[in-house]
Amino acid sequence: MLYQKIIRRTGVTGRLIGQIVLILASLSAIECGKHRIGVSLPLSGEKAESGKAILQSLQMSVEDINASGGAGGNSIELIVKDDANNPAQAKQISEEFAADDGILAVIGHYDDSVAVAGLAAYDKTGMVIFSPSVGGKEFIEKSPWAFTGTYTVATQMKTLSAYIKSVKEYDNLLVIKAVSTFGRVATEEFASATRVDGIRTTVVEGFNDKTAGLADDFVRKNIPDTNSYQAVVILSHALNADLLIKQLRDTGYRGLIFGADRLGTGLIPKLQKLTDESKGAAVYSDKVHIAFPFMYTLGSLKGMRFADSYKTRFGAEPSIWAGFAYDGLQLMAKAIAEKGANRQAVRDYMDGVNSFDEGLEGVSGRVFFAGGRHSVGRELVMSRISSSGSYEPAFQQIKEVRDAHNLRQVEAKVASGEMVMIAGTPYFKISVVFVGIDFDKINNVDIKAQRFDVEGYMWYRWVGDVDIENIGFKNGDMAGDNSSDELRKKIGDTPQSENWASFKVRQTLIFPFNLANFPFDVQHLPLVIAHKTRNANKLMIAIDREKISDAAIQEIYPQEWDYLGRKDFAGTFKIDSVFGNPSYRRGEKQAEFSMYEVQLSLKRILSPYINSFFVPLFVLLVIGFLVSALPLSQIDARLALVMTALLSVIVFQMAMSSNLPSVGYSMRTDIYFMVSYVFLFLLIGKTLLVNAIFNEGNGDAAFAKRIEKYFTVTAVPAACLAYVVITIMALTARQAAMLF
């Protein structure tokens, strides 16, 4: 045996070989192991739905990480425990996680008090705890091992106060404080912010957001005159918030109601149920505004894909905390892959993700920990509940000014109304424009010219002074046959009234078609809508999803395409120019621009190409193989037949290429042609060889015939197999593209 020879020649003993094998096996086991991440969430009790949503997103994140190769070559495994949103239970779980050296980090804990309860164990053993939802200072500022996927409560309350002061111009508020830790912390931070902003507040305490049920007379007993306040601010969790809002409305309050982000979880269906029970006597969701750190409506394509996938799989919209948890696990996987599979490495990596450029492009936007704190740098997005029952961005937003260029321009921009100064802090005043577009037809998908034309109906909704005429198609062809005809328009009576305008549009758009899989290709035609000159610090574009039609586009020209559907998503893009503005210094860049992109997915119909491509190419190859049917003595005829087939394929490819653009990569048709050339050149070589053998001296006809027969019985199946493999690969790529 070979191993015995090795032992005799090298002197290696069987025992040593056994030890080597054991070492290699153990190394292999380590390499093929799993990186374990602890998860502590409320999976029972009042907050079970919130915990379940986060866990489901974590399961999606694990699947995506492991499907792409895992972290450092090893898969991620979640160790899930139910803390029931109970501090004592969370403390016990944190101690169990901390004592298990195999657990590298922890994600979870929904509420402040629960997260704080587990903090000592994580801090003592040096383990990262990432909470997607807790932003209180008692959690985030007490340990270098604590990270949060949201902004701090202080940031939220400061911006909420500034929004109410600058956008609504209110200075007399009723604040309803919940008994929870979040209610206490949020009220303290809001009181601090409103004092600085010059807003008078009256605080009502005792609102129960911990256990189900609210006293029927809570509002009448604690708030004698609700209409003596310009607005009501509820600082609580969502539990019982619907009942509180109902009592406020039923006692005659008709003003605005503002809520912190925690209020929004599951609130809409509860308010809708109360509205239905009132039989139309009251619409309890009217004039309710929730401050969020993120909204999928303004999210990127990645965020919309996540939201769509989550909804398809679980039958509900993902919470924002679910998105934050998904990204938190992605960060941990990246930390393990780049820094190592130990607790300190995870912490060091996450601590270093402290700038936009270092951040992770997640489903909730760019994820990085800002300002020297372990909270994600997010901006408050004020939302409202739409008439159809979903959260949508309010028409006016604010954002704190932080970049050097705009800080130098504060005085001038405040004077022009572009910014507002609240208690010494400058904020951008941002207009939100809702844009929607329905398509009537796609007039011309011109592959060679890298253009396509669309016709449809486009509309805008906005408040205030917005130059909607400068909102257009970023990838539009200015030389195309473009038109925009106004259909209807409604302008409100006051600056705060909602405006609306609709247009019949025809537009030519530029798009570099991906023809790598031609003619099996699937094309995703983009229409990018943005303002020409106003960046995202001035104007944000939101998708008017509720009004967009789901109807399929019936007319597509030329008629070689099937319509698969559309994707609508928002986001931002950079322009590497300051438009020559002299106020910018060297190296400074202007802010990103807000955009709304529609992608129309089309699948090329294959049946026309069966007759125009596959059959002709097959016939030409068959003609080449027919050389085997001619007598060996007809040398000229045999060569002429093969050369005719070869030249015909060359001409065929040139004719097809003339109708396609010049690209720097091979198309699927090129691969078919290359296979044809290979077999035709083999035919030519075989024919010359057989003729040489047959005509040498007396000629060995039998040997020549054997070569001829052997080539035919091997080359024909080989050619068929090659084409089948190419076709299967093309169809597989086509199917993957259709799932886009």
Image (cartoon, helix red, strand yellow):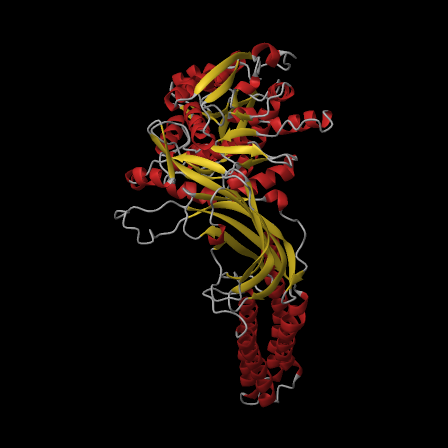
Query: Which residue occupies the foreground of this view, 178 or 345?
Result: 178
720 relative position to 413: left or right = right
Residue 240 visible in the shown view: no
The residue that appears at 59% across and 31% down in the rendered structure is: 56
In the image, 424 versus 318, the foreground residue is: 424
Task: Name the residue: 62% across, 72% down.
Answer: 613
Q: Residue furthest left?
A: 586
Residue 642: which quarter of the image? bottom right
Measured as percent of width and height from the top left, residue 441 is found at 63, 60
* Vertical placement of residue 683 versus 137, above or below: below
The answer to whether residue 611 is visible is yes
Nearer to us in this view, 98 or 469: 469
Marker count (numbered): 0
Q: Nearer the viewer, residue 154 or 145?
A: 154
In the image, residue 722 sits, relative to residue 633, either above or below, namely above
x, y percent for residue 677: 54, 74
Furthest toward the front, the residue is 493
Residue 462 lies, with reference to residue 178, above or below; the image says: below
Q: Which of the 4 image quarters holds residue 51?
A: top right
Across and down, in percent, residue 530 comes to 47, 51
Give coordinates of residue 532: x percent, y percent.
Answer: 43, 53
Would residue 568 appear left or right of 7 to someone viewing this image? right
Residue 279 in the figure: left or right of residue 636? right
Q: Is residue 705 above or below residue 409?
A: below
